[in-house]
Each structure stands twice: as structure tokens, then as C-alpha cells.
Image (cartoon, rainbow, N blue to C red):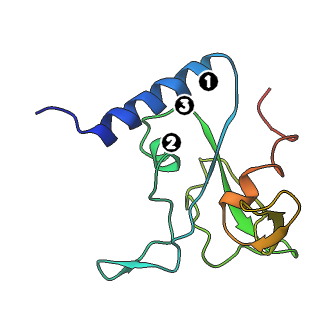
Amino acid sequence: MPLRGADIAWQILLGRMYQLSKRNVQIVTAAGNSARVYTRGRLRSKVDTAPAIFDLCGKAPSLLIVGSCDEYGKRYPSSQRTGRMDFKQIYAPGVSVQCATHNSETAYTMATGTSYCEYPFHVGPSDRH
């Protein structure tokens, strides 16, 4: 059975992730924002989206999975989590984050989600040596 376009794209991404890992680059990915979404009658509270799920399935190099928290350090209810103590997950500000808009060079907007805490908050610290 031939691979579909999306399958090929994910294989390319996994290949790039392994190349980076061999160079000791810590790969960081968002946990996902579907913790309050029901699929087939169950909450999706645990990470179930790519590329974060690749690490949990053992198909990718070690990832650092970033969930979102509010200004008090409390996990944002929509932020998914690994649910496993043997996987690295950190939380970074991801609620009402001031960020640039796509339609202006000077305007800002407030946004919420794990994509907003992936960068730049985690870029400096890392526990990987």
C-alpha cells in the first residue's frame, strides 16, 4: 500500500528529529490543547497529537513536551499532559500571552494555548547536557 502525502511528511519530520537528536539538540514540542475535548465519549486529557505522541509511542528521540499554565503556575485546563512520570514535560506561560499579530508590524494580541509557550519561554533552560 503506497504511503499518503501526510504519512511521507511525518516520516520526513521523524528523520529530521533523529538527525537533530544525534547532534544533541533538545527537541521541544507543544503538548496540545485538547484536554477538554471529547472523542468517542472520552476526554482527550493526555497527549495524542503529533509530534508529541511520537515520543510516548517510542518512535522518536527524546522530546521535551511543553504544556501551558497560567500566571500562577497552574496547568491550563485545556493543556494536555503526558500522564507518565518517565517522560519529560514542563509547563510554561500559555494563558493570555501577549504576542505579535500576523496582520501588523506593530500590533499585539493576547493568545492562549500550548503553541504560545513553546517559544520563547523554554529556549534558555534545558536539563539535557
Q: Residue at x 59, y 63 (%)?
A: 81
**Label 1 – label 2 distance at C-alpha:** 12 Å
What is the CA distance from the residue labelled 3 to the residue labelled 1?
6 Å
Q: Are marks 2 and 3 in contact (CB under 8 Å)?
A: yes
At a point 42% along the width and 35% down the height, the residue shown is: 59
> Local crowd at mark 3 within 10 Å, few (<14), some, or many (≥20)?
some
Q: Which mark is residue 21?
A: 1
User: Which x, y percent locates residue 62?
Assistant: 59, 35
Coordinates of residue 93 in the picture (x, y in percent): 81, 65
In the picture provided, is 128 more to the left or to the right than 83? right
Q: Which residue is mark 2?
A: 55
Within 10 Å of the Cα at label 2, are there few (<14), some (14-19), or many (20+) other Cα atoms? some
The amino acid type of the residue labelled 3 equals: Pro
Q: Are marks 3 and 1 in contact (CB under 8 Å)?
A: yes
Q: Amino acid at mark 1?
A: Ser
**Residue on which the image places disc 3:** 61
Give the secondary structure at mark 3: loop
User: Label 1's element?
Assistant: helix
Q: Residue at x 48, y 34 (%)?
A: 60
Classify 10 Å Cα crowding around label 1: few (below 14), some (14-19), many (20 and above).
Answer: some
In the rendered view, would you say 42 is above or below 58? below
**Residue 56 drawn above or below residue 111:** above
Q: Quadrant of the N terminus?
A: top left
Residue 110 in percent (x, y) is at 79, 74
Closest to the observer, 110 or 79: 110
Q: Type of residue at label 2? A: Asp
Which mark identifies residue 127?
A: none
Q: Is residue 3 left or right of residue 81?
A: left
Picture coordinates of residue 111, whole percent (x, y): 74, 71
Q: Earlier in the sequence, mark 2 or mark 3?
A: 2
Judging depth in this view, the residue of 23 and 113 nearest the camera is 113
